[in-house]
Image: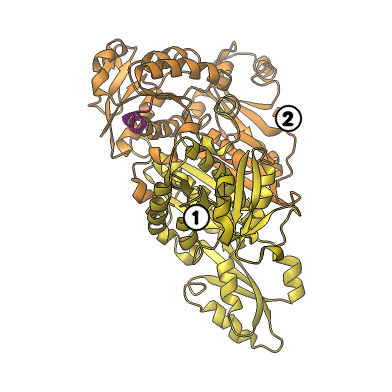
Chain colours: A yellow, B orange
Amino acid sequence: MIKIAIAGYGNLGRGVECAIKQNADTELYGVFTRRNPESVKTVAENTAVYSIDEIEKHKDNIDVLIICGGSATDLPIQTPKLAASFNVIDSFDTHAKVPEHFEKVNTAAKAAGKVAIISVGWDPGMFSLNRMYADAILPDGQDYTFWGKGVSQGHSDAIRRIDGVLDARQYTVPVESALAAVREGSNPELTTRQKHTRECFVVAEEGADLARIENEIKTMPNYFADYDTTVHFISEEELKRNHNGIPHGGFVIRCGKTGADGENKHVIEYSLKLDSNPEFTASVLVAYARAACRLNSEGVSGCKTVFDIAPAYLSAKSAEELRAHML
Amino acid sequence: MIKIAIAGYGNLGRGVECAIKQNADTELYGVFTRRNPESVKTVAENTAVYSIDEIEKHKDNIDVLIICGGSATDLPIQTPKLAASFNVIDSFDTHAKVPEHFEKVNTAAKAAGKVAIISVGWDPGMFSLNRMYADAILPDGQDYTFWGKGVSQGHSDAIRRIDGVLDARQYTVPVESALAAVREGSNPELTTRQKHTRECFVVAEEGADLARIENEIKTMPNYFADYDTTVHFISEEELKRNHNGIPHGGFVIRCGKTGADGENKHVIEYSLKLDSNPEFTASVLVAYARAACRLNSEGVSGCKTVFDIAPAYLSAKSAEELRAHML
């Protein structure tokens, strides 16, 4: 059995707890939290909860640690620190800062003889893999990533910070006609506005100036100004009833040409339709936890990304089973 | 530059010749054929063509050999034999005989200190990878593979062997309603007949008994009897004009559940839409040729499948580039 621990217990940590149960070869060692352990309510009643301050004491009992913190401030500190004692997995998703994060984690993991796999999930993660495979197979081509339909936490938070807003949920929606043009293989040039729209469901304070709120949303730089944005004001009850989930998904599409004169067109498409973004991400994290544990037991150390991990390491099935039944 | 040679020059070999040109880090050493080399017309005029009988003499000049023979009789002999002297790639696609083929090739490649990657292409190949990744991520789920719309060479050949048939082209077509049910996440049980239909375009001899031919096709065991099959009799001109390509493609879909009680549903879908089946397969072969060459230069030997190859080995981009731009 692979003993997995969770550091940080929000939606993602909860998802990891559930995912570990679905895998016959993994078991949950426990949850480590910055909060008072007694205040943490886990999915399973018997899940052990410890203070993160005491994690070093548990070092020899844990095969791999899944770090479920946020990319903005938690992971840049936590992953290098914890990689000095544990095999670790994180879902660091600030694409632009990956090289810097990689270097810090690699130094720590190498020194400790541990394996760290960073930026695991679906984007970065499965989407990255599909961009890379498709690019390697069809070098004369172009790839496109579309996100949604799904809830963007960052955009929802940005709306909540507007004066007069009580709560909000923002959906990123891919533009169907853009998807169709890409699938056609016409390699269109698409602007930000042409690829996605943004749909906002907002609960406003009683008597708030709705026109002003709508305008503040639609003109917010970086978040909304470059998009066609729709704003719906709804009641708190409706928000809870109809917008309580955290669905997401998206599409990675590459169109390329082959032949003596590029006369043949090919379309590779990978898509996800997820009822729960954090639970799916958690499921990917657990598969890579298996890989980290196996790689480390083979003597491998250092920082890795999904690009560096041979697919078979993710599977609970043996090499013989994979060849006989999944090839 | 990675020097690649081609053994066997049909549609697949021609595709490999074209694919090598699209990759800046690969070059074609030459084509090896069982035919009289002077009778072989290559895509590029200056491609060197040699007799396969002399391939051993070229051993030290070739980094990796892509074997483009057929799975029925060529590859079971050729791949183990050539793996004793070369890093090799093949597209062995008799799923049931993979374990046996693997063992023979592994023994030869290990003894020679060479890398052999077998069953490379899209199914087996990219479809296998996607079945495996999705199975590892969503263990509580079910996967489905649909093929088409595309030309099945084996089924087209089977029709051509019927008395009174001059030529034929058979398309495998996935049933839209079955695809929709799978994407819904309802995990339907689907019979062979419910998943695909078969559409046949047949050129008959003048005066042939068309009703008899149609009946022989529709009742042919293994090939057509278990499917809803449509037969169209057309002229030779129409066959040449409208059915001259070798398109193919298909879908790998996995639906799975996560959560404390499996309350959240997820759909992972990978699809290919290919104008030219052999040229796309060839493009995959060339990416894995790059991987074989790199792995061997790191001291790796033995037989591998797509499950064993870390994605980064397929890419012409460096690890730093991949992390910075593709993650």
Q: Could you tell me which chain the residue with mark 1 belongs to?
A: A
Q: Is residue B111 visible?
A: yes
Give the residue at x 56% y 46%. A60
Along the line of sight, which residue is nearer the eye, B115 or A258? B115
Please state the horizontal and vertical placement of residue B108, each as a whole percent of the image. Answer: 41, 15
Q: Which mark is residue A82?
A: 1
Please state the horizontal and vertical placement of residue A46, each as a whole percent of the image. Answer: 75, 52
Q: Quadrant of the N terminus of chain A?
A: top right
Rendered image quadrant of residue A113: top left
Whether residue B39 is situated above or below residue A211 in the rendered picture: above
Along the line of sight, which residue is nearer the eye, A287 or A325? A287
Instruction: Estimate how packed mark 2 is, as few (under 14), some (14 to 19) or many (20 or more) residues with alpha carbons within 10 Å.
Output: few
Q: Could you tell me which chain the residue with mark 2 belongs to?
A: B
The residue pinned by badge 2 equals B191
Q: Which residues are magenta?
A: B293-300
Along the line of sight, which residue is nearer the eye, B176 or A7? A7
> Residue placed farthest to the front in the image?
A57
Q: Is residue B48 visible?
A: no
